[in-house]
Image (cartoon, helix red, strand yellow):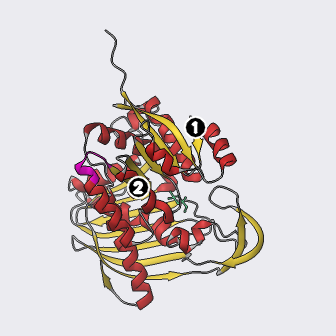
């Protein structure tokens, strides 16, 4: 008797720009490299413009395209809705999908406000009781070197956490003529560098240390207050059109924080760090050891073991490309390394595993809400010029 084929998991994905492409790649690749308990089927891709969505569906490998996400929720062959749209539609789509009994994967930040994130979390908790599961996409958790960092902290190799330093540095807005894409529109994105990339920084710090941010004091700045409006043009940076409009979000965010274990956090997020492309950098200093990670060298983790004899102590550079490291065995022979897209694939692998096991995937919507509350506190703290507890 042959082995039974894993059951199908029909996916509807909403949005087909940069994140949609990354998620499409993940849905397609995950079952090719990992033994999944369910086989994802890319049933329908949903977008606003019929022609562009049809073209994207064919290019990214989806069976059908549609311009109506509500219809996708009624389909019996759709089990999961993957939300890759700007933040202003996350809550509406996620709430409707959960109510329709569909599992949900939602891009970060979970929502554009704490109120929306709370409603989504309540709905996710309620859905989980019916076996319908929801996850938010903080993908950097699933970089093998980040998994190793968390493991070392959990094993006590770092000791008590004294300092967490996270910088998320990009430079795609340095040019004042870079167009006004949706990420620069508060109505659509909720905030700027804060929600887009500091959200990752906060989640990463909390994930690696297992601690929570309990209070913050922040500053926000918008360096370029007016830009050319964007014409269509998919992708991160867009294409400049006629006329100019106001930038309604922060270009950069910085904040100090207290952590639940008594340590201090320093966070910085900017799209104006000329020369830094996608440098999400984390450093943890503990009573026993230190860790350092930089996504621009994402297959490496630096670890300083404070218990080494002083004469030979020093940061060791661990190349996280071996079968012993999380997720790596499914890919290439030892030493060959992974890239940006792999973390999205790992996210799908874990999500599908959780759904098949009927277990809550992490990061959950509640984890997303925790981050949202930190972002909100930073914003209010910056407005008031005051320290705020989260
Ligand atoms: C743009 O800053 C962006 O694409 C973020 O939106 C993503 O979440 C991050 O992974 C890369 O940078």
- The picture quadrant where one finds residue 161 is bottom left
Image mark count = 2
Is 130 positioned to the left or the right of 2 in the image?
left
The front one of 320 and 141 is 141
Q: Nearer the viewer, residue 41 or 380?
A: 41
Whether residue 103 is in magenta: the answer is no
Residue 305 in percent (x, y) is at 28, 56
- Residue receiving disc 1: 64
Residue furthest to the top:
1
Q: 95 above or below 216?
A: above
Q: Decide which of tag 1 and tag 2 comes sooner along the chain.
A: 1
Q: Quadrant of residue 123?
A: bottom left
368 in relation to 28, above or below? below
Q: Is residue 216 left or right of residue 83?
A: left
Q: CA distance from mark 1 to mark 2?
A: 21 Å
198 or 246, nearer to the observer: 246
Dot 2: element: helix
User: Is 207 on the left-hand or right-hand side of 176?
Assistant: left
The residue beneath circle 2 is 96
Q: Name above or below for residue 28 compared with residue 169.
A: above
Please state the horizontal and vertical placement of residue 182, each as a whole percent of the image.
Answer: 60, 66
Q: Position of residue 48 (x, y in %)?
A: 61, 54
- Residue that appears at 37% across and 22% down: 5
- The quadrant where residue 54 appears: top right
Q: Is residue 128 magenta?
A: yes
Q: Residue at x 22, y 50 (%)?
A: 129
Q: Which residues are magenta?
A: 127-133
């Amino acid at each position: 008797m042959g082995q039974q084929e894993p059951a199908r998991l029909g996916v509807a994905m909403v949005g087909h720009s940069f994140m949609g492409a990354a998620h499409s790649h993940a849905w397609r690749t995950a079952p090719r490299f990992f033994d999944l308990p369910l086989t994802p089927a890319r049933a329908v891709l949903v977008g606003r413009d019929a022609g562009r969505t049809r073209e994207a569906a064919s290019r990214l490998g989806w069976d059908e395209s549609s311009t109506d996400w509500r219809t996708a929720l009624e389909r019996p062959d759709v089990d999961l809705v993957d939300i890759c749209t700007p933040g202003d539609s996350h809550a509406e789509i996620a709430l409707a999908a959960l109510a329709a009994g569909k599992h949900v994967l939602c891009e970060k930040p979970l929502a554009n406000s704490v109120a929306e994130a709370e409603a989504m979390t309540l709905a996710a908790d309620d859905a989980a009781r019916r076996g319908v599961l929801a996850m938010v996409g903080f993908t950097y958790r699933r970089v093998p070197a980040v998994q190793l960092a968390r493991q070392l902290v959990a094993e006590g190799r770092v000791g008590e956490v004294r300092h967490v330093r996270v910088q998320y540095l990009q430079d795609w807005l340095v040019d004042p003529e870079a167009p006004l894409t949706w990420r620069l529109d508060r109505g659509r994105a909720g905030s700027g560098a804060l929600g887009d990339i500091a959200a990752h920084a906060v989640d990463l710090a909390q994930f690696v240390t297992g601690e929570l941010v309990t209070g913050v004091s922040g500053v926000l700045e918008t360096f370029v207050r007016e830009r050319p409006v964007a014409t269509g043009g998919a992708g991160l940076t867009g294409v400049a059109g006629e006329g100019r409009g106001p930038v309604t979000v922060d270009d950069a965010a910085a904040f100090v924080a207290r952590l639940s274990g008594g340590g201090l956090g320093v966070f910085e997020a900017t799209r104006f760090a000329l020369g830094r492309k996608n440098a999400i950098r984390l450093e943890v200093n503990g009573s026993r050891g230190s860790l350092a990670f930089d996504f621009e060298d994402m297959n490496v983790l630096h670890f300083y073991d404070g218990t080494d004899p002083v004469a030979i102590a020093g940061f060791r550079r661990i190349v996280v490309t071996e079968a012993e490291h999380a997720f790596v065995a499914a890919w290439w022979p030892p030493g060959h390394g992974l890239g940006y897209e792999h973390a999205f694939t790992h996210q799908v692998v874990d999500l599908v595993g959780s759904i098949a096991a009927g277990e809550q995937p992490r990061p959950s919507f509640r984890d997303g809400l925790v981050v949202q509350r930190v972002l909100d506190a930073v914003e209010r703290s910056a407005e008031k010029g005051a320290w705020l507890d989260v």
